[in-house]
């Protein structure tokens, strides 16, 4: 059976779940997981389309914070496609 998430998406979702509530930007996530800037943008776009993350603007800060949605908190990063 095929995986629901790519390896990078699994890693990002798992990382965000482990660090829920922390103020993390895409740059923070990319650095922690050793993912290139363009790649992290694509992964986050995919997770956002699935309704698992949102980008939150913060006053006086250029980079947006990445937050899990309620679905993102409970999503299984290792889930298979049905």
Image (spheres, rainbow, N blue to C red):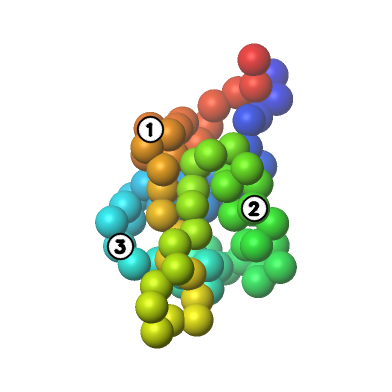
Q: Estimate how packed mark 1 is, as few (under 14), some (14 to 19) or many (20 or more) residues with alpha carbons within 10 Å.
A: few
Q: Is residue 54 positioned above or below 64 on the image?
A: above
Mark 1 residue element: helix
* Sequence-earlier tag: 1 or 2: 2
Q: Please tell me which residue lies in front, 51 or 36.
A: 51
Q: Is residue 8 visible?
A: no
Relative to residue 31, is residue 37 drawn left or right? right
Q: Which residue is mark 1?
A: 74
* Residue 71 point in image, percent of width and height: 43, 34
- Extreme bottom residue here? 60
Q: Is residue 43 above or below residue 58?
A: above
Residue located at (31% from left, 52% from top): 20
Q: Nearer the viewer, residue 53 or 3?
A: 53
Residue found at x 54% / y 27%: 79
- Residue 22 is tagged as 3
Can you tell which quarter of the image residue 36 is in?
A: bottom right
- The percent position of residue 63, horizontal first and vertical second, equals 50, 76
**Which residue is labeled 2 in the image?**
45
Mark closer to the chain start, 1 or 3:
3
Q: Is residue 60 visible?
A: yes
What percent of the width, then of the height, locates residue 24?
A: 40, 67
Measure the alpha-carbon separation of dots 3 and 2: 20 Å
Q: Residues within 10 Å of mark 2 (few under 14, many from 20)?
A: some
Q: Is the residue 72 above or below the residue 15 in the image?
A: above
Mark found first going from the N terminus, 3 or 2:
3
SS at circle 3: loop
Q: Position of residue 73 (x, y in %)?
A: 37, 39
Labels 1 & 2 near each other (Cβ < 8 A): no
């Amino acid at each position: 059976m095929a995986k629901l998430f790519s390896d990078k998406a699994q890693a990002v979702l798992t990382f965000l779940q482990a660090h829920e509530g922390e103020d993390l930007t895409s740059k923070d996530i990319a650095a922690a997981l050793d993912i290139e800037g363009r790649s992290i943008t694509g992964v986050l776009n995919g997770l956002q389309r699935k309704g698992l993350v949102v980008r939150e603007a913060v006053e006086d800060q250029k980079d947006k914070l990445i937050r899990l949605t309620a679905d993102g908190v409970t999503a299984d990063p290792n889930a298979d496609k049905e």
